[in-house]
Image (cartoon, helix red, strand yellow):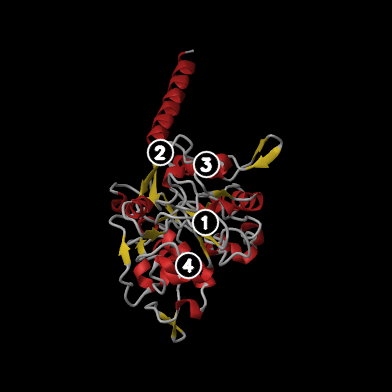
Amino acid sequence: MNLLLKAFWLASCVLVGTLEADAQILVQGGGATMPAALYQGSPDSILPTSFSYVPSSSGVGKRAFLSNDPSLFSTTGTVHFAGSDAVLSSTELYSYNSTFNRAGDPTRYGALIQIPVALAPVIIPFNKPGSAIDLSVTRICGIFSGKITNWSSIDSARTGTIRVVYRGESSGATELLARFLNSACQPADVSGTTLKLTNGVPAFSVQSTFVNLFTSVPENFVAAPASGDAAVYAAIFTTVGTMGYTGPDLSLDLSDATRVAQVKGFSPKDVSTQATLDNVAPPTGAAAENPANWVPWFGNPSSGYPIVGTTNLLFGQCYKDVLLAARVRGALSRLYGSVVVNGVEQGPNDAAIGAHNFIPLNKAWRDAIRMRFVAASNPAALNNPGTCSGIGRPL
């Protein structure tokens, strides 16, 4: 009997110790400001309370995660994940694999996982009293290239210089806007501007830092006084005559075209998933091995609001601590699962995603992400024992 009691006591101590250790584990991350309230800090935020998220910028988030530098989030330990609206570049992927995922290195972290969370429209708020504004592609190209500088060029009832506020830091919102402009703008739309040359003519390129689009930034452009969408929003609505670009999760009615511009006749509430996400299938086969292929690009969609991309999460495949890995797996399982609401199958966070003015992923993308990165039997899945045995990002 005494032996049974002793065995029970020892087992209880082990269980309590495991639960206490698990309770102390914090999954640390940060990055993009665009989805910050969706991720944490709001009643309907979608990340578990065991996750921390430090809003900084997409550029900071990627740097912190790729180099495992927690000081960029003003903390210590390990950067376990990051948020970014900017896609990992081939250079970033090569640098990471050369540093932290070298074949045969017993200290390697394992492969990267880059997955979309939701569609993210980039909105064009402005502060110039008057009627609704609907920007054609030519006009939006002219405004953000510096070719169009006066309100009278987009509305005969308004006059004065257009003051354009841009993100000063490396930003996913900048990259999403630049991707649209790169796809949509014709040489005639931006001729005579200070955009950097492509094939000998000014053209938009894909950049996450706004000033890198230009040889010299136009005189009517000004950087936001601080990082993040909130700083751009504040700069716009404290100065009449100002226009800029931000993510959608602000205290604005996105359908009010006297404050948020329509583009090609559509408000940011009118993103067409059929014209964007439904036209891009998740990668399969060899293409699925490249993290860059898990972020769909839309260019200039044929219908619906056109300035749209995705907000994404970055994880490592392998984590040394099994309890931390279990928390990450549990979060991904819920993020990319399915529930039935009023007889309709949808994502478990679709309501929250919509409430923050993002657009949920469709079932095809949720299923593909869950089956590849969450299902324990898949060699590419989080902490697959055959792939991650003995290696991983530290606690």
- Give how far apart the Cα atoms at labels 2 and 1 are: 21 Å
Furthest-right residue in view? Answer: 343
Furthest-front residue in view? Answer: 157
| Amino acid on which disc 3 is placed | Ala
Q: Can you see residue 132?
A: yes
Lower position in the chain sequence, tag 1 or tag 3: 1
Q: Which residue is mark 2?
A: 41
| Amino acid on which disc 4 is placed | Ile
* Neighbour tally class for label 4: few under 14, some 14-19, many 20 plus, Cα within 10 Å: many
Q: Which residue is mark 4?
A: 140
Lower position in the chain sequence, tag 4 or tag 1: 4
Lower position in the chain sequence, tag 3 or tag 2: 2
From the viewer's side, name the closer residue of 60 and 299.
299
In the rendered structure, are the residues bearing label 2 and label 1 in contact, judged by CB atoms less than 8 Å apart? no
- Secondary structure beneath dot 3 equals helix
Side of 360 relative to 175 (left or right): right
- Secondary structure beneath dot 2 equals loop
Quadrant of residue 12 within the rendered picture: top left
| Amino acid on which disc 1 is placed | Thr
| Amino acid on which disc 2 is placed | Gly
Q: Which residue is mark 3?
A: 355
